[in-house]
Image: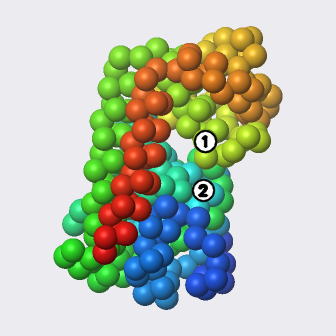
Amino acid sequence: MAVKHTPTSRKRSAPTSDVPVRNGILAALLATEYKHLLPKLEHVELQRDEIIYRADHAIDAVYFPEEAVVAMVATTEGTRTVEVGIIGREGIVGINIFLGGVITPDKAIVQLPGGAMRMKSKDLREQMRFGSPLQLVLLRYTRAFLAVISQSVACCQHHSVEQRLARWLLTMNDYAGPGEFHMVHESIAAMLGVRRVSVTDAAAKLQEAALISYRRGRIRVLDKSRLAKRSCECYRFIRREYDGLHGELARLLSRK
């Protein structure tokens, strides 16, 4: 039986229409029905390493990240884990609800702390109407997200740890901005599905090449263009998917 899980996120006051919208899905709805959804949303602060969902548990709420970044993590029958998708300000955490599910097969863990808009699952279901702007936006996002998941699976099978680490660091840097972000080798290894020593060795090579700096869990990308050359093509694929999604949503809703 599914067990409810209540995240430890700190709540904020209810959002208002004059607060800047920092999530891509909600921003796409500004010209149509964002104000209609606003009473169903609450602004929360997600904490680093917070578990939003546990595998095979009920999804009580969905999240539209702003500064926060969440990783969807699959676990084998043993203790091995691997990240199957990273969700930031472009998307929604809890897409299974949109697809008709009530539980999630993966665990959702906060990688970068920050704000998110939370909506109860039942409220999202009630807002779904055939052909509505919300449904159309979520359909386009789901298509992009599934493409990213497929690419991530291929990446795990065919690319080296150094390439995958470079891709992961570039992705985190895109979300965190030019400053540093915090992540220890154990957590990165869990995301990549490899041993900690493999991450340590790969990170040392990138640091020796002056592509990154790493000290006590604080990571900074020093040369993004050169780091991108050390990455696999998956980073560029993911960027194209999400950049294309942004433009597609703008064109889609301009016709509504």
Q: How many badges with numbers are in the image? A: 2
**203 relative to 128, above or below:** above
Residue 254 shows up from this direction = yes
Front one among 188 and 159: 159
What's the residue type where badge 1 is placed? Answer: Asp
Pointer 1: residues within 10 angstroms few (<14), some, or many (20+)? few
Please give the name of the residue rendered at 28% of the width and 50% of the height, measured from the top-left corner: 143
The image position of residue 138, as x and y in percent, is 32, 63
Q: How is the rendered protein coloured?
A: rainbow
Please give the name of the residue rendered at 63% of the width and 73% of the height, measured from the top-left corner: 20
What's the residue type where badge 2 is placed? Answer: Ala
Please give the name of the residue rendered at 69% of the width and 44% of the height, measured from the top-left corner: 177
Pointer 2: residues within 10 angstroms few (<14), some, or many (20+)? many
Q: Is residue 186 left or right of residue 136?
A: right
CA distance for labels 1 and 2: 12 Å
Helix or strand or loop: what does disc 1 sit on?
A: helix
The image position of residue 92, as x and y in percent, is 43, 60
Residue 128 falls in image quadrant: bottom left
Please give the name of the residue rendered at 76% of the width and 41% of the height, measured from the top-left corner: 179
The image position of residue 72, as x and y in percent, is 43, 47
For marks 1 and 2, give the one nearer the viewer. Answer: 1
**Residue 218, numbered label:** none
Q: Are marks 1 and 2 in contact (CB under 8 Å)?
A: no
**27 relative to 167, above or below:** below
Quadrant, the N terminus: bottom left
**157 relative to 87, above or below:** above
Helix or strand or loop: what does disc 2 sit on?
A: loop
Q: Earlier in the sequence, mark 1 or mark 2?
A: 2
Front one among 180 and 201: 180
Front one among 244 and 113: 244
Mark 2, residue position: 68
**Residue 174, numbered label:** 1
